[in-house]
Image (cartoon, grey):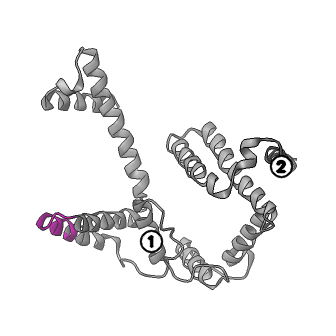
Amino acid sequence: MKRENQLKAFERLLDIMDELREKCPWDRKQTMESLRPNTIEEVYELSDAIMADDLHNVAKELGDVLLHVVFYSKIGDEKGSFDIADVCNLLCDKLVYRHPHVFGDTAVKNVEEVLKNWEQLKQTEKDGNKTVLSGVPASLPSLIKAYRMQDKARAVGFDWEKREEVWAKVKEEIAEFEENPSEEELGDIIFSLVNAARLYDLNPDTALEKTNGKFRRRFGYVEEKAKEQGRNIRELTLEEMDALWNEAKTTE
């Protein structure tokens, strides 16, 4: 019954999309190119809901992302290029092909072997990645891109033998930056720290976003306390701001 309800809900969405495309001037006007910025925005809104652990909004934002998948598929259907069935079947075929340990006879011992097989299989697909790093989109944010490139390189064996070895590289890059402060040397430090995070099973983008949120909360506290004193934050001395900052830390 649950699967039947899920299929009915998806069919309802497809029917609504058909009607919107036919009867709504705005929906009828959209192209893949015009939808692209909105799609990016929707994914970031989903990310915000996930970071806030707001499951109600996770479901809501997933719906918005799904709408875009259906919208692109509708436009593809109108062009005679593909439809939602093609999208689903291409995905299913890919998942089956890349999981021979589930749908075939391949044996794997751990997650690392699954990932290694995944990357190798991607390069054997007709329309798959021709190089290890070609599957990393150039438009990804730099921090995520660094993590994904390192992760893909790891999948084919290009990695530290022991994760503790990465710290020597981090210290080396910091020393070089101290000697020559430049964008290139700063990039090397960040890249090495991303490597360290990955080796310790930490996502650097998630970690930085949590720190961003912490900074926003604490700085907001300083601003609010300044207002309660009838002062503008610009009127506070650095010592006063530091005191309020430390006060904010104790309230968390």
Vertical position of residue 251 compared to residue 50: above or below: above
Taking the magenta stretch, the answer to whether it contains residue 143 is no
Q: Residue at x 29, y 73 (%)?
A: 165
Q: Quadrant of the C terminus?
A: top left
Residue 242: image x %, image y %?
18, 32
Of the pair 1 and 150, the residue shown nearer to us: 150
Taking the magenta stretch, the answer to whether it contains residue 179 is yes
**Residue that numbered label 1 is attached to:** 149
Instruction: Give the label, 1 or 2, closer to the camera.
Output: 2
Circle 2 packing at 10 Å, graded few (<14), some (14-19), many (20+), is some
Circle 1 packing at 10 Å, graded few (<14), some (14-19), many (20+), is some
Secondary element at image label 1: helix
Residue 32: image x %, image y %?
66, 57
Q: Residue at x 71, y 57 (%)?
A: 72
Q: Amino acid at mark 1?
A: Met
Vertical position of residue 62 compared to residue 142: above or below: above
Q: Are marks 1 and 2 in contact (CB under 8 Å)?
A: no
**Residue that numbered label 2 is attached to:** 18
Vertical position of residue 228 compared to residue 69: above or below: above
Vertical position of residue 48 compared to residue 203: above or below: above
Earlier along the polypeptide chain: callout 1 or callout 2? 2
Q: Say how many tags the image has.
A: 2
Residue 33: image x %, image y %?
62, 57
Secondary element at image label 2: helix
- Prevailing secondary structure of the magenta residues: helix
Q: Disc number at residue 172? A: none
Q: CA distance from mark 1 to mark 2?
A: 39 Å
State which region is magenta: 172-182
Residue 61: image x %, image y %?
63, 43
Q: Amino acid at mark 2?
A: Asp
Along the horizontal axis of the image, is 26 left or right of 164?
right
